[in-house]
Amino acid sequence: MTATTNPVRRRRHVLRVGGIAVRTSRRAVVVVAVLLAGMLLTALLAVGLGKYHVAPLDVVSVLTGSNTSFDRVVVLEWRLPRMLMALLVGAALGLSGAIFQAITGNPLGSPEIVGVNFGAYTGALAVLATLGSGYYAVAAGALLGGLVTAVVVYALSFHRGVAGYRLIVVGIAVGAVLNSVNQWIVIKLDHHTAVTAAVWQQGTLSGLTWTQVIPMTVCVALLVSALVALGPQLPVLQLGDDAAGALGVRPDRARAAYLVVGVGLVAVACAAAGPITFVALAAPQLARRLTASPGVALLPAAVMGAALLLVSDVIAQQLFSDNELPVGVVTVSLGGCYLIYLLATQARKR
């Protein structure tokens, strides 16, 4: 009598939204649904927290239009734009991190490690120094600075193709140079602009209003549309250049297109809230571990990035009741611990 053991196969499903078909696993769907539910609950609490407390049920009544008291001003005008910006910026950073990690084939391949964050900040500082503040001007400067940095890093690391480790090493070097340039620019600015740039450099969501939410929403929607237009090439790139070429994908052209979209996501996030670090590094890998996916997935990374930044912003506001911290300080603290864990894990594998 012989016994045979059948390997357990993970069931995968195809979700169709209009003409778009996405192949996913049941576990990934459950994880994304749980994250979205947690985000909704956290968002209700975040909008109500503060010196003027608004209960969650009162927040719901304001959003449904049945509450017209002073709570409406607090929720809709003061706190809701900040909460929405936390979700938008976090989702943009999560998507960008997933793109860069898929391109480099390395969990350390995030925008802040590769140096794109520093380049976007350099472009934004150049605009602040010459033209002054203004969302659209700063966004254009951040986008141009990020794109130039990405092109330089890509060109310097190109040798018979682009290897992930070369891209990371060159990016770290270029980022170090740009960080020095940024400090020099801040020193040369007048006192008021330098203080504004120094606070903004830490990454902050304070003071954001609907005037930033609307253009940020439009920019993220356009960049996500570009991702959809590129099709399912990113998972193919994760198989390697030879396999991608055999499947009809031109690796260099596809990688360059994804690079532009990834830089665009970092740039709009940087223009809105400053160079917030470590969200793009941690979100894709945390999402990958929770969903047990074989590669970096875009949607779970975006949802995880939004959740991480929203929770970090709540901590930044409530940790010290009298003094609000920049959200970037919290993400650096949490992300630094995760980076140490990631480096230790990579060293143990080697």
Image (cartoon, rainbow, N blue to C red):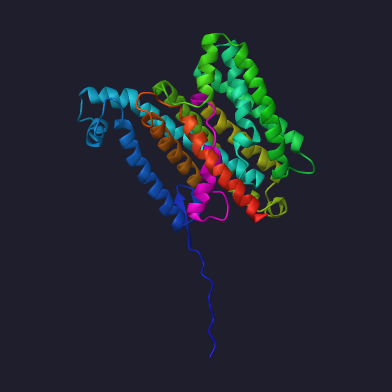
Is residue 316 rendered magenta in the image?
Answer: no
Q: Is residue 59 left or right of residue 184?
A: left
Magenta stretch: dominant secondary structure: helix
Is residue 287 rendered magenta in the image?
Answer: yes
- Expressed as whole percent of the image width and height from the top left, the position of residue 124 reads 58, 20
| Residue at 32%, 23% in the rendered image | 77
Relative height, residue 151 to residue 126 (above, below): below
- Expressed as whole percent of the image width and height from the top left, the position of residue 39 reads 38, 41
Query: In the orientation shown, which residue stands out farthest toward the bottom?
Result: 1
Query: In the orientation shown, which residue stands out farthest toward the top?
Result: 190
Q: Nearer the viewer, residue 185 or 322?
A: 322
Q: In the rendered picture of this protein, how many numbered marks are placed on residues?
A: 0
- Expressed as whole percent of the image width and height from the top left, the position of residue 29 reads 43, 53
**Residue 229 visible here:** no
Q: Nearer the viewer, residue 153 or 218?
A: 153
Q: Which residues are magenta?
A: 271-298
| Residue at 38%, 49% in the rendered image | 34
Q: Nearer the viewer, residue 334 or 28?
A: 334
| Residue at 40%, 31% in the rendered image | 84
Q: Quadrant of the C terminus?
A: bottom right
- Expressed as whole percent of the image width and height from the top left, the position of residue 290 reads 48, 53
Relative height, residue 328 to residue 168 (above, below): above
Say which quarter of the image contains residue 85: top left
Say which quarter of the image contains residue 117: top right
